[in-house]
Amino acid sequence: MSRRLSRSQDGRPAAPVRIVHLGLGNFFRAHTAMYTEQAPDADAWGIAAFTGRSYAMAETMEAQDGLYTLVVQNPEGNDYQVISSVVATHPGPDVEQLLTYFRDPQVAIITSTVTEAGYVRTSGGGLDVDHDGVKADVEALKGGDLASVTTVPGKFVAGLVARREADAGGITFVPCDNVPDSGHMVETVVRDLAGLVDDSLLEWVDANVSFVTTMVDRITPGVTDEVREAVEADTGVEDPAAVATEPFTEWVLAGEFKNGRPAWDEAGATFVDDIVPHELRKLWLLNGSHSLMAYAATIVGRPTVYEAISDPTVAGWVNDWWDVAAKHLPLPAEEIADYREALLERFGNPRMKDALARIAADGSQKIPIRIVPALNAERADGGEPIGAERAVAAWVLHLRGLGAPVNDARGDEVTSLAEGTLEEAVVRVCDYLSIADAGARSSILTLAQELEAAAA
Ligand SMILES: NC(=O)c1ccc[n+]([C@@H]2O[C@H](COP(=O)([O-])OP(=O)(O)OC[C@H]3O[C@@H](n4cnc5c(N)ncnc54)[C@H](O)[C@@H]3O)[C@@H](O)[C@H]2O)c1
Ligand SMILES: O=P(O)(O)OC[C@@H](O)[C@@H](O)[C@H](O)[C@H](O)CO
């Protein structure tokens, strides 16, 4: 007879809320919440977590007092750990509750994993002021109706307005999405929005708010019934909030904390002054090859990372891309070689069922930062970055309906780029991605034709 998790039965008292998290998804449960759990001062740092737009995970976790099972899928078998750092869960639309936390001087940190698209930016990196949700948030904030905001930047700014009114002191944003210079990214959207609704907030932000940049790494697939069944069979717990992940984990942070932080360093996180090499290593080598496989490997009938990397042709494409990226990474060759080797091992973990359809989502936010910088840099150096160009070619075909389905925050805009003949599609997508080099465009067309011919 299986049981459900509960704090009283599992002997896990709840810590006071000092961290608020936006985006109660799989990755947060596998990574950020786990670091807080493992910090030696975890009993002082409880997390209140909000879902995005839905209610489901908040309700599921509330029913088990925020506890959940973390499943580490080692190649040789699972490890199970009950995580207790999440002490309260709330549906994303409950902005009143979010404001209550912002008004609390004890709350010191706002973490987020809301996907790249959640920060509602233009391709230039600023707040997308033409976005309908942002426009509505501007009006709500101007009218003092803080609880009506719906976008993530809207929630951040509403929270800061509430915190200033409550004179609750310093606070730090710690975004944990796969975005380079993520602290600066959040600072930009917050400042852009604050500037539109209340200029005086900017000065208060200068004095009271800091933005920490992070590099986060732990491959966390969507949860399957197989995972939940293994938890029940092996631990006797029926846990609808269980999440499965790989053994590897990394968290690198840079920046100042205004109001303290957990001893995450003692739980394995690394604090650095210069985060750029760490970000680029991970974003280009791991996420770049992920995106390449998500588009190219699904076209040739490989639906998961494991199946893709086990196919020598796809593995060759990944290596082609890594060869391009390696030339433009500001890192010692040996470090890059070690990371490539480790990635092959991680991708080759047969127990991880990581669907490439998950990774394919929101390519409009990912291809420009994961692939295009190295592609353009190599062309500018007179090289032929075929490994990068193949990723773009595959994305063009993906937008034309081949391979993984399109699920993109800018779906209408980017699929319309790929209409018409393949030649027209390549030109429009290259314009969109700022790939101007004629040789690159011609190579992308040839590679797209080859991939189309190889489609499963
Ligand atoms: N899964 C991984 O392997 C992994 C690893 C490193 C980093 N990340 C980062 O974490 C992010 C989330 O990944 P996940 O696996 O937790 O996904 P997930 O789908 O499990 O969770 C995403 C969360 O973000 C919310 N969300 C989505 N779009 C939003 C929007 N437009 N506005 C507000 N909230 C929104 C969702 O409601 C959900 O709570 C990724 O986009 C990535 O940047 C993921
Ligand atoms: O999470 P996304 O959507 O930004 O990217 C998909 C994957 O590349 C990503 O989730 C990786 O699994 C992760 O970044 C590994 O740390």
Image (cartoon, helix red, strand yellow):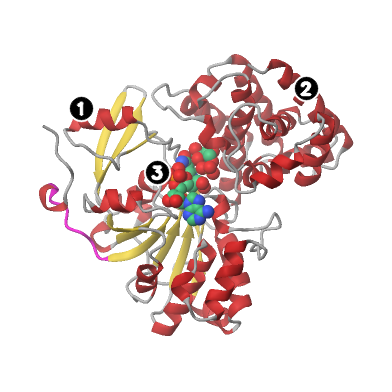
Q: Decide: marks 2, 1 in contact (CB < 8 A)?
A: no
In the rendered image, residue 127, in percent from the top left (x then y), is placed at 64, 63
As drawn, the label of residue 43 is none
Mark 3 element type: helix
Relative placement, left or right, of 91 versus 253 is: left
Looking at this view, is 398 or 171 the one in front? 398
Indicate which disc, 3 or 1, sits on the residue closer to the N terminus.
3
> Residue 439, relative to residue 115: is it above or below?
above
Looking at this view, is 367 or 97 the one in front? 97
Q: Residues within 10 Å of mark 2 (few under 14, many from 20)?
A: some
Separation of marks 2 and 3 at Cα, in angstroms: 36 Å
Separation of marks 2 and 1 at Cα, in angstroms: 48 Å
Identified by mark 3, the residue type is Asn
Identified by mark 2, the residue type is Gln
Q: Decide: marks 3, 1 in contact (CB < 8 A)?
A: no
As drawn, the label of residue 449 is 2
> Residue 207, relative to residue 35: is it above or below?
below
Mark 1 element type: helix
> Is 14 colored magenta in this rendering?
yes
> What residue is rendered at 58% in x and 19% in y?
301
For the record, the magenta segment spans: 10-16
As drawn, the label of residue 26 is 3
Overall secondary structure of the magenta section:
loop
Separation of marks 3 and 1 at Cα, in angstroms: 21 Å
> What residue is rendered at 70% in x and 47% in y?
413
Foreground label between 2 and 3: 2
As drawn, the label of residue 233 is 1
Indicate which disc, 2 or 3, sits on the residue closer to the N terminus.
3
